[in-house]
Each structure stands twice: as C-alpha cells, then as structure tokens.
Amino acid sequence: MSLLQFCTTERQREVASRVDKGMSAREIGLDLGISRTTVRDHLKAVQKKASLQGYSPEHDYVHSVPDGYTVKGVSTLYTDGKPTAQWVKSQSDKERQLEMLVERMEQSLDLVPPFKPTKPPKQSDDNLLSLLTITDFHVGSACWEAETGDNFDTKIAADIFLNAMHDMLAACPKSKTGLLNILGDFIHFDGINLQPITSGGGHVLDADTRYTKIVDVSMSIVREAVKMMLKRFERVVVVVAEGNHDISSSVWLRKYIKHLFENSRVEVIDNAFPYYAYLHGNCMLGFHHGHKMKLANLHKLFASEPRFREMWGKASAGVYIHMGHYHHERVIEDGGAIAEMHPSLTGRSSYEARGGWMSQRGAKVITYDKLDGEVHRTTIRPRL
C-alpha cells in the first residue's frame, strides 16, 4: 500500500511518488521547483486523508477502509511490542459519498445527447436582465385541501411550474438576458434510502410519490423551462441553489442542466458554496436559500466574502440579494443592498397549516437595467 492511492491532485501524486522512492523533502523540492514547506503541506494533506481511511504505517495502521468511509476507531493487539492483531471500525463519510455521487453523475451525463441549439430572438435590449425566481417549490410534497386549504402533488406541481414559466416569460420586457433563479428546496426531499425524510433532522415528510419519479419530473420540467427561456432570451443564466430540503438533489439537478445545455446559450452558475452571485453591468445580483443566514445579515456576507468583493465594488447600480426559505415576502434595505425574501408557488403543507403559518402564493419577475438597477417587476399567481 502507498500514499499514492490517497492523492487527489497531480501535485500530491508527484510528491507521494518521490516519497515512495525515499527522497527527502529537500530533494523533492529541488526536483519539483517548490519549497520544502510546500512539499510538507502536500504530504500532510495526503497523510491526513490516508489516516482518516485507516492507513498510517508509523502508527501501525495498515488496514484501510473503502473510499466513501472513514475510520471511527482502531484497536491493536501488541505482543512483545509488535502488532499481532487489529480491529478497525468504520463509518460512512457523507461528504465524500456525495462527491462520488456527483462524479458518477457527471460521467454518466457524457452519454446524454447534446441539446440542439435554437435560434436566439431577433430583437432584445442588451441593457436588460429579467430575473425569474421560483423558490421552495417542493416537487414531491403532498397537500390535502381538507386539512391545509390547498391540494398539491407531483402532477399539480408540474402544471403550476410550466404555467408559471409561461406567465413569467409573457410578463418580461425584451431583455437580452434571462436568469432562472431556482432558489432552493425545489425538490421536497433528498431520497435518503429513497425515503421522504429531511437530510438534517431526519423528519418524516408528507410525500406524494417515490423519489425516482420526483427525479424524472424535476429534470423534465426544468429542462422544458430552459428551452422556453432560450426562445425568449438571447442569453440564459441558471441558478439552482442549495436548500435545506434538497442539499444533494440541488447538486445533481444543477449538473444535469449544465451538461445538457453545454455549448449552447446557457450558463449555469455551478459552485459548491451555498451563496451565488451574478454581475449584470453595474448591477449585482446575489442568491441564497436562507437556511444558513438570515435576511438581515445577507448583505454582510456578500460584501465581505472574498469571492464576491470585486463584484460588489463594481455594483454602482445597486446590489440586490434574493432569498427564500420562509415562503413569504419581506424586503430589507441596509448596508448598500436590497435583500428580498420571495414567496412560494407551492401549496401549504400540513406542518404550516397546523402551525398557523399563512402566506400568499406567488412568484416574482424582476427586470434590472445595467445602469439603473431594478426597472420593472410583476407578480404571477399559481394556476393549473
């Protein structure tokens, strides 16, 4: 066994292969043109991953666990100072298993036929971007009108979503750019063991159907939505934000759209960080579901986060941050930004009804000018 099998980057493999040859940190540094400190940092990273999987020869750990698992504990029996038996307890590494799932999905998407490009509209205004926000849609949830006041299931969800897209597009001015903002919890549950339970707390949810059908319906309606937008806009941007109900499902949905519309007029904002941003001229748009930070504090995150600072500095036309999570509307202007909480199109759940929470269902279409910020908005209501 070698440290090589625990390397994740090419530089780590270069360092580990030379360690296997007996080279010192100084010799490796001279050979690769890097400092000894850098060599040691790469080596420490590999050794840490190896030890988590049960391989650390200097500590007599020589029985590794499979990729996707970490070591929970090791018991070693020593006889006359030498290890003669060893018991290794392992546990699943959920973060690594999600990474492996994404890797397998991206590989499988290579077999999906590419999307055939469509012609862009003949006329559009380059200064305008229309933002279409769908948040907390919960495909796969079940609501019973006698209990909650609303009927909602997977078929109803598909109808409402596609009708909403039609109405939102009809309300847009002739913007050159359209941004589909799926702002988290688009899918009702992540399908842990294919069961309708939340990822974090393990709470049982009211579900309409099986997870595999939810996957099919979600992929189908989002794919159709992007096709509709390509007929309406010259450029289409897609955000599929992480929500607390669909932490891993949002990943595969985002990857699916990214690969399906590769080499077309579609840009998918694809990052593992649960905060997303887009710069339209001098206008900055920020997105977060709301499960990690409250509305009142979002402007501080986007202003201070290193990856967004340059974008914030260019946003002389305004910073507009969008959030979902609570299924109702609220707007705060503070710290040089306008932070807005969006309503949901989905039916009221049993949990909401029994808790006495109520909000008006809807979705917003907001148009931004590169120089003037927000210039137009429309609210649409759900219809079958």
Image (cartoon, rainbow, N blue to C red):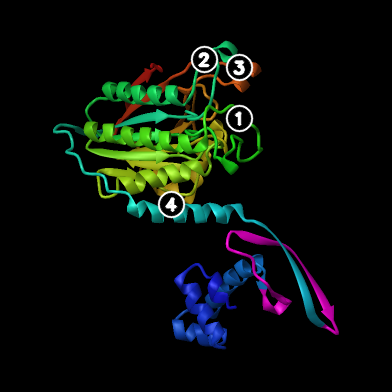
Residue 122 point in image, percent of width and height: 13, 33
In primary-sequence order, the first of circles 3 and 2 is 2
User: In this orientation, which residue lies closer to the viewer: 170 or 283?
Assistant: 170
Residue 254 visible in this rendered orientation of the protein:
yes
The type of residue carrying mark 2 is Asp
Q: Residue at label 4?
A: 105
The first of marks 1 and 4 along the sequence is 4
Tag 3, which secondary structure?
Answer: helix
Select label 3 or label 4 by which is in front.
Answer: 4
Marks 2 and 1, the one that precedes in the sequence? 2
Q: Give the range drawn in magenta.
A: 56-81
In space, the residues marked 2 and 1 are separated at their CA atoms by 16 Å
Residue farthest to the left, as pictured: 122
Residue 51 picture quarter: bottom right
Q: Mark 1 points at which residue?
A: 205
Tag 4's secondary structure? Answer: helix
Q: Residue at x 38, y 45 (%)?
A: 256
Q: Is mark 2 on a helix, strand or loop?
A: loop
Q: Name the residue under label 3.
A: 353
Q: Nearer the viewer, residue 6 or 219?
A: 219
Question: Label 1 sits on what residue type?
Answer: Leu
User: On the image, numbered disc 2 is attached to which residue?
Assistant: 150
The kind of residue tagged 4 is Met
Task: Report how far apart the C-alphas of labels 1 and 3 lie in the structure.
Answer: 14 Å
Mark before the other along the chain sequence, 1 or 3: 1
**Of the pair 262 and 233, the residue shown nearer to us:** 262
Image coordinates of residue 244 in percent, x first then y, are 56, 37
